[in-house]
Amino acid sequence: MNEILDLWYSESLAEDAKFSIRIKEHIYSEKTPFQQIDFFNTDTFGKFFTLDGLIMITEKDEFIYHEMITAVPMAVNPNIKNVLIIGGGDGGASREILRYPTVEKVDMVEIDERVVRLCQKYLPITACKIDNDERLKMHFEDGLQFVKNSKEGSYDLILVDSTDPIGPGEGLFTNEFYNNCRRILSDDGILINQHESPYYPSYCKEMKRAHSKIKSNFPIAMVYQFHMPTYASGHWLFGFASKKYHPINDAKFEKWNDFKIKTRYYNTDLHVGAFMLPSYVKEELDNS
Amino acid sequence: MNEILDLWYSESLAEDAKFSIRIKEHIYSEKTPFQQIDFFNTDTFGKFFTLDGLIMITEKDEFIYHEMITAVPMAVNPNIKNVLIIGGGDGGASREILRYPTVEKVDMVEIDERVVRLCQKYLPITACKIDNDERLKMHFEDGLQFVKNSKEGSYDLILVDSTDPIGPGEGLFTNEFYNNCRRILSDDGILINQHESPYYPSYCKEMKRAHSKIKSNFPIAMVYQFHMPTYASGHWLFGFASKKYHPINDAKFEKWNDFKIKTRYYNTDLHVGAFMLPSYVKEELDNS
């Protein structure tokens, strides 16, 4: 704890609600052509960083988000070989997916190289595989353009690990983007989408917007939830979309367990439980 | 929104983390022999009240907590007739349990009558059944003494809807209390316990303390989770303990659905999912 300076970071959850963390040190701040990036150090959460003032990940709970974005599709199709990550500049999604020996190639498309370089410096806990695993190829370009230019059926898995749909992430929540994702996925391809949150109105609106677009582009479009305490409301969602796999009925849990990958949040029982949504969330999604 | 006064209520989650709500009006404040009670009005959360500065319920999300504390045991044993509520002065648990026509008698034991009377005045959304349903009998006394003096096998269900184990709720997190709960439950009796939260260290400690005591007093002692955004971390737990019923294998979902009770959070799929805990939570509970 910084004993002299009583310095608090706050994130607005609604106009009249906020979550605040006491800061030991404001480690670094930079304004790139895309966004403002800030790194902080704290007691309870370790280091964390923000983009345009919103928490991206903290050292304390990044494992929850990154296990849930990767282990769920890997348990549904343990033969995934070619992966595309859109966003995910902190490197956590690439770190987790590269734990699977069956994964042969990961293309990571991050529009802002500075996010990646700064995470390598300040958050090696998530960025550890960048420049450090020959299966991982970095592309510092726009995700929307990248999927437009990719060939049909190139990927078995796309992880849309984007920021909220304001700022540089905005183009990713469009019909054009999801339509291209479907096109470049193989026949047994899976898309996992950062799907926002059902509780606070502004997040719920984005959840519905994303879901309605994914529903209209994929025959199977479901949603799973997890507890992410440093995100607004702590109730966070991923969208699961695919051309043919049902995320529970087609899951191959035995094969996933055979990977013997040690996880701290995910397990194959929780996989099933995560798709069992509260009634009010189901209603919002059905009406999206 | 109070346009003139920029007034914020904050709840500390850890020494260096807090959740804050902007207040339209501080409606009422009273110090009773047991605790300080405060009522507030807000835009996003409607009205809420605190005991000794900690949020008990808000109008926006009380339904989550109260459905989860009542619907889960009612789906496991839809023949529950005699219910004991310990705490629950806001009335939400009694409101929900009295929706079941099979429930014949509810004893509600709240140590602080002022909580009940003030909730009747300021939070009729939860307190609506108090003095308004002849099946409900109020007892303004100490819960620990009440269970000591109750006869063996008197209840089919005990809901421990207590505050955190500091202040007046402290005696409820003891071996003596849980031992008496077991004694006064019928052979097919169920105990549901406010079980705290796994994320922030001080809450996790209390979760483990409660669970270790319940485990040593009941042959079946499991835990289920839900998303409660206005509680610390948003990740909250109830303990499910019983003499013979397994909360999933013995559940009678068809019978629960036959009640045709409209819920906004609970559904019978979510019932199953709620028991599927993250690995780190399972480990903490196993080591408690």
Image (cartoon, coloured by chain):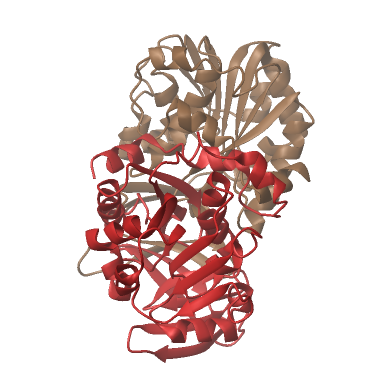
Chain colours: A red, B brown
The N terminus of chain A lies in which quarter of the figure?
bottom right
Q: Residue at the left extreme? A: B3
A154 or A14: nearer the eye?
A154
In the rendered view, would you say A229 is above or below A59?
A: above
Residue A213: x percent and y percent?
25, 52
Q: Is residue A121 above or below residue A50?
A: below
* Residue appearing at x 54%, y 81% in the figure: A119
Quarter of the rendering containing residue A81: bottom right
Residue A21: x and y, percent?
51, 72
The picture places residue A41, in percent across and down from the top left corner, at 58, 80
Q: Quadrant of the C terminus of chain A?
A: top left
Position of B122 with respect to A55 (left or right) is left
Residue B147 percent coordinates (x, y): 67, 22
In the image, A158 versus B97, the foreground residue is A158
Q: Residue at x 63, y 35 (%)?
A: B223
Residue in view at x 27 percent, y 54 percent: A201
